[in-house]
Amino acid sequence: MVEIQYKNAKVKLGLEELVYEPAEDSFLLADAALKELENLGKARREKAKNGKTSEIGKAEKAGQEMRILEIGTGSGFISAVLQASPFPVRVLATEINPHAALCAKENGVEVLRADLFGGVKPAGKKRHFDLILFNPPYLPTSKEEKVPGWLNCAFDGGLSGRETLNRFLDKVGAYLSLDGEVLLLISSITGEAEVKEKMEKLGFEVESLSRKKVSFEELIVLRGRILESVL
């Protein structure tokens, strides 16, 4: 395996024909997640200071870590970066590609080999993840365009480019804490307006956090927060 250094993390990479290697999309989402961890920590400390602690604010006051779930972790790059950050976190990840799941474990990530939320129980009333991350396969893909083998899972977004993302969005609300956030990495070719519309229909307040032009597409990080009125 090859090892790369990013921020405070050293990350081992798998063979490129078996495991998706970190690229511009991975870096953009990792940076956005680090910034959100800092912002979440500040906001919750302020709530605790003012006596306006939510369920998560009480948890932080008791010294508990912020809980993160990364769906489709790949090599484990983003989860490893977050674990190496100065913020108190506990990270759990899922990954459908068995080769990628093994690579993530090599990087010290607690990973379940599963499709999306498989193996992760909904938290019920506790809804316990503070931050859920997903860099979904977003390329519009026909049967003729599929990549042979497990690596196809990293690219194949179905005909619309949103099939896997839509399955994720339909379920993610059951796993979020009351103050929790979703961070998504999407592409302009996936349809930013369509993704935002889907999220808003599901009761999310949506904001574009960062953008980067790469070749023929623009990469975008979206943040979703569940509106209190739908909790």
Image (cartoon, grey):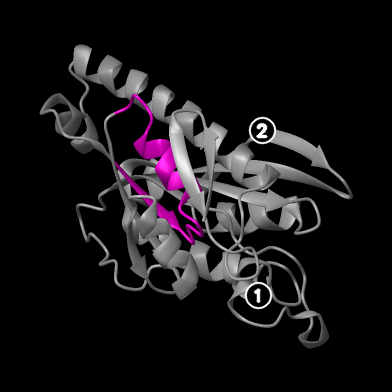
Instruction: Report the residue marked by disc 2.
Output: 210
Q: Which of marks 1 and 2 is nearer the N terminus?
A: 1
Q: What residue type is labelled 1?
A: Asn
Mark 1 closeness class: few <14, some 14–19, many ≥20 residues within 10 Å:
some
Give the percent coordinates (x, y) of residue 88: 27, 30
Q: Give above or below for 117 relative to 35.
A: below
Tell which residue pokes out farthest to the left in this image.
62
Q: Is residue 128 left or right of residue 112?
A: left
- Residue at 50% x, 65% y: name it: 168
Instruction: Say which of 55 and 103 sits in front.
Output: 103
Give SS at disc 2: strand
Q: State whether residue 37 appears in this view.
A: yes
Please state which of the two labelled residues, at mark 1 or mark 2, is closer to the viewer: 1
What is the secondary structure assignment of the residue under circle 1? helix
Residue 162 to residue 41: above or below: below
Q: Mark 1 points at which residue?
A: 152
Q: What stretch is highlighted in magenta?
A: 67-87
- Relative placement, left or right, of 21 versus 68 is right
Q: Which of 32 and 106 is in front in this view?
A: 106
Q: Label 2 sits on what residue type? A: Ser
Q: Where's residue 190, x and y in %?
A: 75, 59
Does residue 35 belong to the magenta stretch? no
Crowding around mark 2 (Cα neighbors within 10 Å: few <14, some 14 to 19, many 20+) is some
Number of the label disc, if any, that sits on residue 163: none
